[in-house]
Image (cartoon, rainbow, N blue to C red):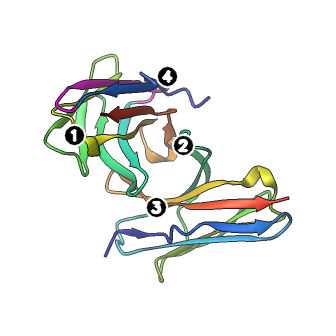
Amino acid sequence: QKEVEQDPGPLSVPEGAIVSLNCTYSNSAFQYFMWYRQYSRKGPELLMYTYSSGNKEDGRFTAQVDKSSKYISLFIRDSQPSDSATYLCALYGNNRLAFGKGNQVVVIP
Amino acid sequence: DSGVTQTPKHLITATGQRVTLRCSPRSGDLSVYWYQQSLDQGLQFLIQYYNGEERAKGNILERFSAQQFPDLHSELNLSSLELGDSALYFCASSGQGWENTIYFGEGSWLTVV
């Protein structure tokens, strides 16, 4: 079992829809949880991070963490074409950052 | 602009050759991380340095090595290159604690022919 599982399947949604992405993990050493956005093989940029179970909102983005289930989610409300990118979950623990494989999201105008 | 600078941006080289990728972290950041990203493997952690010392090691091949210099810049050396080493190599940096967040450079595209 991989440390971080993120179903890498592409996701196409119409503009204005809610995008829902998730990752699962197996190692309890991961204590900090992040979502990165990556455009066209550019460097990943940090979208959100949290270290506690529960929800964290930032504009149209909501990150959700359930440590007991080892499950994290990212929701994008009112999706825009500019949200089209690859989204990677990332977990930090033991001095390293482990990434999921990423989901390519396409928002269709 | 994340403040992390990587050179070269693109590199084409032949199998069996050796290349060096360079990274300058954000000003003041003590930690440098190296990642490899290929189409089928996603982002793979290679190695981390903190203030000149190796701190954590991931899936780094023995043909690869890295170091962080006193001025905090870092180099990733890739030797005896194989076709499968073709990938995007990212450097990232962070401050003293993870809470300072990890910032990525734009990557170095390596193509081995």
**Same chain for the residues under marks 4 and 3 in the image:** no
Identify which residue is drawn at 15% across, 38% down.
B63
Compared with residue A102, is residue B43 higher up or lower down, i.e. above or below? above
- Mark 1 highlights which residue? B82
CA neighbours of label 1 inside 10 A, class few (<14), some (14 to 19), many (20+): some
Circles 3 and 1: CB atoms closer than 8 Å: no
> Can residue B24 be seen here?
no
SS label for mark 3:
loop
Query: What segment carries the magenta color?
Result: B15-29
From the viewer's perspective, is the residue at label 2 or at label 1 nearer? Answer: 1
Q: Quadrant of the C terminus of chain A?
A: bottom right
Identify which residue is drawn at 55% across, 26% down.
B3
Q: Position of residue B12 (x, y in %)?
A: 36, 26
**Same chain for the residues under marks 2 and 3 in the image:** yes
Circle count: 4
From the viewer's perspective, is the residue at label 2 or at label 4 nearer? Answer: 2
Query: Which residue type does callout 1 highlight?
Result: Glu
In the image, which disc is placed on residue A41?
2
Q: Position of residue B24 (x, y in %)?
A: 42, 22
Dot 2 or dot 3, earlier in sequence? 2
